Image: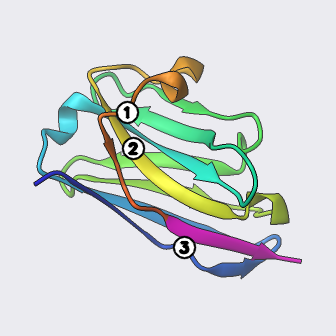
Amino acid sequence: EVQLVESGGETVQAGGSLRLSCAASGFTFNDYAIGWFRQAPGKEREGVSCISNTDGSTYYADSVRGRFTISSDNAENTVSLQMNSLKPEDTANYYCAAEYLVACSSSWFYYGMDYWGKGTLVAVST
């Protein structure tokens, strides 16, 4: 059974940090690009960051570049998103997704993802 399970979401004060994790199972982790989307209440889903396990490429949305860092642990089949200097506008449900055999770029967020997680809630208070 394919699974993407997110964890690490919680409520944090503005300026704080969180680390989200996406644990993958049921597919060949090294063949996929895996990344994060987020969706705030009443807003459209937004691509946040991705990392390709095929070529190591990464990509960050302008809104998070310089504050968030994505990493992949192939031994643990886990992708992590380190989020620093959090802002209230980062508040959203964060979803992990995987797409087969692609590199990461701004285009990645427009592909039809092969697999999705169920999300983890990040709330940033003022």
Main secondary structure found in the magenta portion: strand
Q: Which colouring convention does the figure follow? A: rainbow
Picture quarter containing residue 6? bottom left
Q: Name the residue under label 2.
A: 97
Give me the residue at 48% from left, 73% from top: 8
Magenta stretch: give its range.
Answer: 120-126
Q: Name the residue under label 1.
A: 113
- CA–CA distance between discs 1 and 3? 22 Å
Other residues around mark 1 within 10 Å, as few (<14) / some (14–19) / many (≥20): some
The image position of residue 58, as x and y in percent, is: 49, 30
Mark 2 surroundings: few (<14), some (14-19) or many (≥20) residues within 10 A: many
6 to 103, vertically: above or below: below
Q: In which quarter of the image is the N terminus?
A: bottom left
Of pointers 2 and 3, the one earlier in the residue sequence: 3
Q: Mark 3 points at which residue?
A: 9
Q: Do the residues labelled 2 and 3 touch (CB within 8 Å)?
A: no
Q: Is residue 31 left or right of residue 99?
A: left
Rendered image: mark on residue 12: none
The answer for how far apart the CA atoms under marks 2 and 3 are is 16 Å
Which of 23/56 is in front? Answer: 23
Disc 3 on helix, strand or loop?
loop
* In this rendering, the label closer to the viewer, 1 or 3: 1
Q: Is label 2 in contact with label 1 (beta carbons under 8 Å)?
A: yes
The amino acid marked with disc number 1 is Met
Q: What element carries label 1?
A: loop
Q: How crowded is mark 3: few (under 14 residues within 10 Å), some or many (20 or more)?
A: some
Q: Kindly state the secondary structure of the residue where label 2 is placed.
A: strand
Q: Where is residue 51 in the image (x, y as percent from the top left)?
A: 43, 35
Q: Residue furthest front?
A: 42
Where residue 77 sits in the image (x, y, percent)?
22, 52
Q: How far apart are marks 2 and 1 (CA)?
A: 6 Å
Residue 12 against residue 121 in the figure, above or below:
below
